Image (spheres, rainbow, N blue to C red):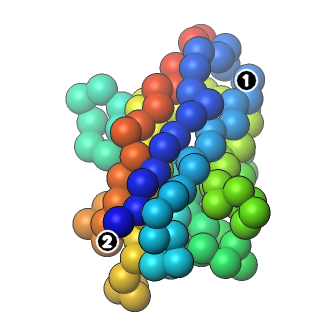
Amino acid sequence: QVQLVESGGGLVQAGGSLRLSCAASGRTLSLYVLGWFRQAPGKEREFVAAISWSGSRTYYADSVRDRFTVSRDNAKNTVYLQMNSLEPEDTAVYYCAGKSGLRVGVASEVLYDYWGQGTQVTVSS
């Protein structure tokens, strides 16, 4: 089993920045990809970004590509999501997810085996 714990959410004004963290523990060697998803009120959960467990490959949704950066700290088993130029439309609960299989793709939530509890990000206009 893998445990994922997110932190770093909060309230920020439009144009501001936040950095989310996702600390992984347990059988982390089984992970291939760590992903970030978000769910806004009344909307389906959507893919935001992902990073290979080695850190060598990153993936982004078009809506965040030029504003968000995903990275990882190998020593801390932690993945980060640096969010800049935040917009009210970025308001959502952000979830960290772990993918342990070799199934192709990173953007579908059904590919992920482990989920964190989520952290709220609110961007005021």
- Residue 79 x, y percent position in the rendering: 64, 55
Rendered image: mark on residue 119:
none
| Left or right: residue 64 compared with residue 15 | left
Q: Is residue 33 above or below residue 35?
A: below
Which residue appears at 71% of the width and 57% of the height? 76
> Could you tell me which secondary element the residue under label 1 belongs to?
loop
Q: Quadrant of the N terminus?
A: bottom left
Which residue appears at 59% of the width and 74% of the height? 52
Q: Quadrant of the C terminus?
A: top right
Which residue appears at 41% of the width and 62% of the height? 2
Q: Is residue 100 above or below residue 125?
A: below
| Left or right: residue 35 compared with residue 12 | left
Mark 1 / mark 2, whichever is N-terminal: 1
The reply to whether the C-beta atoms of the residues labelled 1 and 2 are less than 8 Å apart is no
Query: Which kind of residue does numbered mark 1 sit on?
Result: Gly
Mark 1 lies on residue: 15
Task: State which quadrant residue 41 falls in.
Answer: top left
Q: Is residue 59 above or below residue 94?
A: below
> Could you tell me which secondary element the residue under label 2 belongs to?
helix
Q: Can the viewer see residue 46?
A: no
Which residue appears at 40% of the width and 76% of the height? 100
Query: Which kind of residue does numbered mark 2 sit on?
Result: Leu
- Label 2 Cα crowd, 10 Å radius (few <14 / some 14-19 / many 20+): some
- Residue 26 x, y percent position in the rendering: 46, 63
Task: State which quadrant residue 11 falls in.
Answer: top right
Q: Is residue 66 above or below residue 12?
A: below
Q: Can the viewer see residue 29?
A: yes
* Closest to the observer, 81 or 42: 81
- Residue 15 x, y percent position in the rendering: 73, 23
Q: CA distance from mark 1 to mark 2?
A: 32 Å
Mark 2 lies on residue: 111
- Residue 83 x, y percent position in the rendering: 68, 39
